[in-house]
Image (cartoon, rainbow, N blue to C red):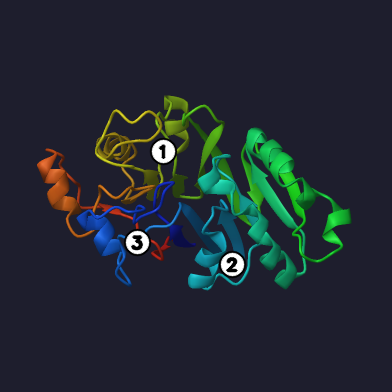
Amino acid sequence: MKITVLGSGTSTGVPEYKCECETCQDARKFGSKNYRTRPSIHIEKDEKHLQFDLGPNFIDQIDRNEIEWIDAVVFTHCHADHVSGTNDIVMPCRKQQMDMPIYGPEQTIRILQRNFDYMFSKETFQGGGVGHLLPNIVEAPFQLHGFELIPIPVEHAAVQTYGYRIGNFGYVPDVKRLPDSSKALLQGIDLLIIDALSFNPRHPTHFSVGEALEVVGALQPKHAYFTHIMHRLDHHHFPDQCAEQDIDLPENVYLAYDGQVLELS
């Protein structure tokens, strides 16, 4: 299974607007790993492709990473940094000459049907400038194009939010609390991509680095990568930043970055 990190940043992206911190200044340099668009991944196996979330950077993300096909879209939740690029699915629909199946929590599907109502009607689809979406509410594990997906309920703000387990891979981009029942669903994974916004454990809706490391310690994946990361975490200095916070950073834990490709057998 090939996993492409399309976006690894928080909801504002990095660099932050008008911020002159060292990380943001570096992020403005071409090719910097500190340049971060909104969180999203794309996974591929046996020539089948699943897209996770459609944020505001979606169309640029798939163009930049040469994503040439999408068989279905899977949503984690309804926040704008994960759904506001939904209208741009029109181009994959047009190029692939297909309607697009979408999957996600019931709240997310209902909000998409309200905010993008024209995408759920064949009548508006006739003009050719609108992608047509086929909604599917996720409530339990399901099979999709040869992938087995297990929704992982997490607490994140006041909205219904899922992470997902896909085989031995866990993707949990937005989380403040991971219930024991959900943690059990992730036992035995080899690869984990998980929310770690900053070093601040008091943030009300996102894990800190320390909180994310507690989950990594409990699950013991072979490798773990942090996503949804803000400008206070710097790729050039992350181990030193952890040391300054009295955090022991394991050798198998890293910051994710936009365009990163991970392979999982």
Any mark on residue 35, and which? 3
Residue positioned 36% across, 53% down in the render? 17
Badge 3 crowding class, 10 Å Cα cut-off, few under 14, some 14 to 19, many 20 or more, is: many
Disc 1/disc 2 C-alpha distance (Å): 25 Å
Q: Earlier in the sequence, mark 1 or mark 2?
A: 2
Q: Position of residue 171 (x, y in %)?
A: 46, 47
Q: Quadrant of the C terminus?
A: bottom left
The amino acid sitting under disc 2 is Asp
Q: Position of residue 172 (x, y in %)?
A: 44, 42
Any mark on residue 71, and which? none
The mark closer to the camera, 3 or 1, is: 3
Of residues 53 and 169, the one nearer the viewer is 53
Q: Is residue 145 visible?
A: no
Of residues 154 and 90, the one nearer the viewer is 90
Any mark on residue 46, and which? 2
Residue positioned 75% across, 52% down in the render? 133
Task: Look at the picture and state if 1 lies above or below 109.
Answer: below
Q: Is residue 6 left or right of residue 53?
A: left
Give the residue number, with chain letter if any, for mark 1.
187
Q: Secondary structure at mark 2?
A: loop
Q: Earlier in the sequence, mark 3 or mark 1?
A: 3
Residue positioned 19% across, 60% down in the render? 236
The amino acid sitting under disc 3 is Tyr
Q: Is residue 174 visible?
A: yes
Disc 3/disc 1 C-alpha distance (Å): 32 Å
